[in-house]
Image (cartoon, rainbow, N blue to C red):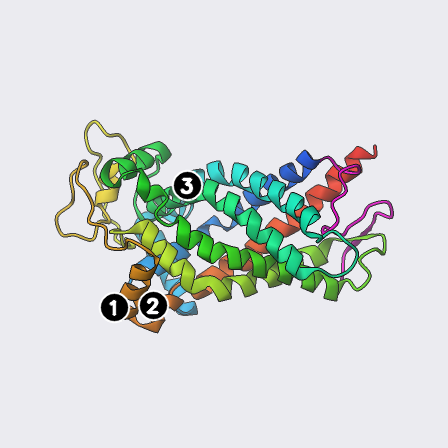
Amino acid sequence: MTSIVDTSTFNDDWEEWEPERMPFWKHMIAGSCAGLMEHSFMFPMDTIKTHMQTYKGAITSEKGVIATFRKVVQGEGFVSLWRGVTAVASGCIPAHAGYFAIYETSKEELGANKQGYHPFAAAASGALATVAHDGILTPMDVVKQRMQLTRSHNLWNTVSYITRTEGYRALFRSYPITLLMNIPNASVLVSANESLKRYLIPNSHDGQFHFFIYFLSGAGAGAIAAAVTNPLDVVKTRLQTQNLHSCHCPVKSPTIKGVGLGAPAQMVAVHTTSTPPTPTAKHVVKYRGIWSTTRTIWLEEGLKGFSRGLVARMLYHTPSASICWGTYEVMKHLLAVSDRK
């Protein structure tokens, strides 16, 4: 049953930004809240996805999701599912603020706010916003995935370790593939979300706030976009994690003297080589670019390699997109209502 709220004075069509009715900065606040809610609640599934995409032994099926979950929890503890959440939280707030700032501006410029159905203009707006969003979030996403695959709990020690052993370039090595993945992902997500809302709410100006529909359309759009772009996500994950593999062993790693808890000692516990590197050792870069990484995965694992983590990715993005876009709509509604009081 559809949940609706009577808001006859509120324009519930998110494709129509009206600055005089709602200040621009409030869209940024709504977007930041949406991003924080999305990443915080769905982070454990993101951790499972990261393990599955980097661990060659994982099977890419529903059974693989459950098996990976059990191994991670048994080997590293339940709390390890949230390891790295500080990295994504510190990046998602400014990233989502920038995303929705550019998103709302480009919608106005490209005509997505005009009367009628404009899915391509909305898709283009989402793609443009993604460029800024990923420029801010990619470095922290690299740090997040390193923390997910190691026993590191310290954000800044992890950043220091990556830059010292691989250079600052390592934080942005995956930026091209991230854009290559997220631009079509954002385009599909935004256009699918708009299309689903148009289908589920034929009369979008009926003066009702369709709470349930906003979350449902976001979920459907998230599932579609996740499935389409999963192969690119596998390539991105390999570039960002490099010589790390998914560690499912319950071995406690020591702390290197003078470095502190959560830094290189924890990194050593999951290194692929038989001899752990020293804190100053340089990693051998296996994946150097998009095409070389794609070729390596194809030669070593075949087509199956690009489907790794597909179920986990869909299980993550379906509810996360629902939470993100649903929260965005709710926050816009609440902020707009507060303007009239």
Work out which quarter of the rendered image holds the N terminus and state it: bottom right
Which residue is denoted by mark 3 in the rendering? 140
C-alpha span from label 1 to label 2? 8 Å
Residue positioned most to the right? 8
Mark 1 burial class by Cα count in 10 Å: few <14, some 14-19, many 20+: few
Q: Secondary structure at mark 2?
A: helix
Which residue is denoted by mark 1 in the rendering? 300
Q: Is residue 201 left or right of residue 237?
A: right
- Contact (CB < 8 A) between labels 1 and 2? yes
At 70% from the left and 60% from the top, the residue drawn is 118
Identify which amino acid the numbered label 2 is placed on: Gly
Is the residue 280 above or below the residue 34 in the image? above
- Contact (CB < 8 A) between labels 3 and 2? no
- Residue 305: image tag: 2
Q: Is residue 291 left or right of residue 211?
A: left
Q: Earlier in the sequence, mark 3 or mark 2?
A: 3
- Report the magenta stretch's main SS: loop
Identify which amino acid the numbered label 3 is placed on: Met
Q: Is residue 12 left or right of residue 292?
A: right
**Which region is colored magenta?**
1-23
